[in-house]
Image (spheres, grey):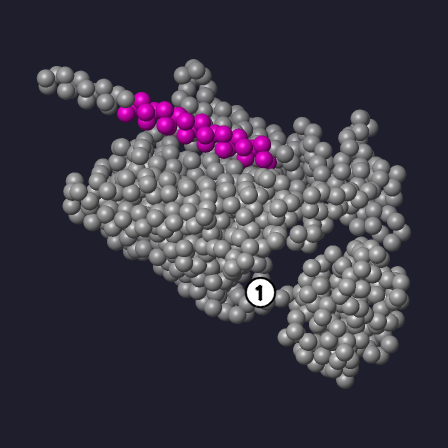
Amino acid sequence: MIAELGLTALWLAAALSVLQLVAGALALRDEGGELAKLVRPAAILQGLLAGFAFLMLLYLFAVTDLSVKLVETNSHSAKPMVFKLAGAWGNHEGSMLLWITVMALAGGLIALAERRLPEKTMLATLAAQAFVGLGFYAFLLLSSNPFERLPMPALEGRGLNPLLQDIGLAFHPPTLYFGYVGLSVAFSFAVGALVTRQVNPVFARAMRPWVLGAWIFLTLGITAGSYWAYYELGWGGWWFWDPVENASLMPWLAATALLHSVGVLAARDALRTWTIMLGVVAFSMSMLGTFLVRSGILTSVHAFAVDPERGTFILFLLVLYIGGALLLFGLRAATVAEGERFRVTSREGALVINNVMLSAILGIVLLGTLYPLLTEAFDVRVSVGPPYFNPVGAIFTIPMLLVMCVGPLLRWRGDSLGRIKNSLAIVAAIMLAVLALVVVLGSYGILPVLGLSIAIGLAIASFLPLRGRNLLRVPIATWGMVVAHFGLAVALFGMASETAFSEEKLAAVPVGESAQVGPWTVTLENVEPVAGPNWTAIQGRFAARYDGGDAVILTPQARNFWAPPQETTESTLATRWNGQLYAVIGNQAPDGRWQLRLWWKPFVTFIWYGGILVALGGLLALIGRLKSDLKRRYVKSRLADRAAEVAA
Amino acid sequence: MNKAWLWIPLGLFFGFAGLAAYQLTQPKDEFIASTMIGKPVPEFDLPPAHADRPGLTISDLKDGKPKLLNIWASWCLPCIAEAEHLDRLKREGADIVGVAIRDRPEDVARFLAQHGNPYSKIGKDDLSNLQLSIGSSGVPETFVVNGDGIIVYQHIGDVRAEHVPMLLEKLAEAGG
């Protein structure tokens, strides 16, 4: 009954999205007519129905209803509750339902809360949102119904991929989805504005919170995904330039560029066509990422819900939406009036450079990710990895980071570098000093050395916009920028430090003896079998001492899951403020010694602290923007009241 | 002013879409062929996994007769499904040797009593050493090994009814 309720709600929501699309499109010709009044309620109701359908799916997973095919395939009665719930979206059908739910809820929220946009742009935006949604409804209902029943209820479920039975990962895909869906809203706004040709600061202010929100989630998603790969895969690295990782990085790069250009549009009414273009590109990258991951067209370590048939469907949607939007862009962009002009040495100028660099990095990542696809057409199999991405990406990343030090200090419209030369001199001196120090200390690669020096310079430069200001009166959004830029510097410091200073040790050690890595001495105290709810494991007990200090007990495992059978390594970490010891236990050699794999990674945690700081900066900016929007709305209504009083 | 650049994104996008569509229609390799095919099985010496059958060493695979080397475990469900087909292969004249992965003798005995014992020898591979060295990553898997101990074929997953003739043919080829 519950499954049928969910399915019914889903069909109704799909029907409402048809209504929303048709009524919205027709009402564009007949502004203020009866049809226009249907659009907002349809969007709100559609959001509620999709939300209801998702709750029903969660319930089915919570009670492990084995008459439902999706539950049987992806869950198991022995699983802990949190993973039962996570099972609802840890598969193709459920994750698509989550996607459409978040998208419908977002549409409902725009319909409910957005009051600034001209009516026509609003209608076009909601119609575009319904159009995008409709494709996903069709996908779900016609080819991947999550509520499908089995002819006979099963006795037991078939489990969930054990690699996904991890608390971090359970919440990693939904986080990225919130980001992707936020970008779909930005896309709808861009299409709406193209239809009505009203690209202006009002439009930018309406779009900005969605871009910011999406960007926060994408930042958190990438940070969490990177940490997951780091401690779950057991390879000791934090970024592998894997197609799936790139699929999450590309929308982030596009969203970062969009975030900055929408800021210029809101503040200065410049970069109109460019912002629209980025709005389309950012969502394209989300769709492209989904396509690459789901179609299995590229080989990846993340074999998740791969199915070429689904790939075809997503490709069809991709062509329909992105092709359609770019066609509209080609037709309409020339007719959008040109925005304000500005000098190169100005805040806008720096932001344009930032945008060009980000777009170039995006292009490089995109090319590297798709290159194997291109060569495969000519029967040449290649894989593109760090030797391409790191140096080529750095060509644009380094100038971008340097401009990041300068841009926030410049004034809007026009400024001169002479005015801020003192600040620049301080930052440059610090960078050179760090550079010299690291070069004297030892021989490390050129990229990590530059990384360390720029990270420290940027960390200081990111606070310079606050110099000479009353900190209590600095707008929250400015604090957001400062924190986000500082966060990037922190993450960069972690990356560079990990690359430059990491030490690795592979040792075969009998029980009772020790291995040395960096400042750590690690003693293998014993090895024992342990069992969990659905796995058995070999567990090592390590006593790790930093510089001969107190012992930290680590218990890495090599786990064997039995439903379905699969092996995973559970690495363990000893975290200090200045880095992490990373330990993995391997097989036993014939002579009884155990393989240990140990890494000492100075400041590696800064990568993820930095990521969190960047997201926090985004959150502060979002709060700041929403607050000033509310204030603006309040002032406007007061002015209207006053005008009414005067007229009376 | 020339607005031709506004069409560049659309052009690039359709270039990508065409390429992706082409690639999607290309047949995909279902399995990654083991790089061990054509190479000899490395040295090994496994103790018996079951009281009734001897263990398995490299010399058993070099006795001049082609063999099926079946990687399995009593805790593996697809192995139950393939048991009857292994029995049929044995009746058709195949010599099957088994490697029990991470298993206990009592579980092995129970499994064989319940689902039949097609194996002439069963080695016990508690740490998957042999399994990994011949390029197998899961259970069940079945290798065709010729009389000189060279791996000629790898079958990933359970043996089903439709695979039986194919495996017999591979064995015949390996014997010739």
- Tell me which residue sits at (47%, 63%) in the image: A309
Q: Is residue A196 left or right of residue A263?
A: left
- Is residue A366 shown above or below B175? above
Figure quadrant of the C terminus of chain A: top left
Give the chain of mark 1.
A
Query: Does residue A451 appear in the picture of this structure?
Result: no
Q: Position of residue A194 (x, y in %)?
A: 27, 46
- Quick check: is A317 in the magenta stretch? no
Q: Is residue A53 left or right of residue A389?
A: left
The residue lying furthest to the bottom in this view is: B176
Query: Does residue A619 appear in the picture of this structure?
Result: yes
Residue A273: name its quadrant.
top left
Residue A313: name its quadrant.
bottom left
Q: Position of residue A548 (x, y in %)?
A: 82, 28
| Magenta stretch bounds | A607-633
Three-letter amino acid code at disc 1? Arg
Q: Main secondary structure of the magenta part?
A: helix
- Tell me which residue sits at (65%, 38%) in the image: A498
Residue receiving disc 1: A381
Residue closest to the eye, A154 or A569: A154
- Quick check: is A631 in the magenta stretch? yes
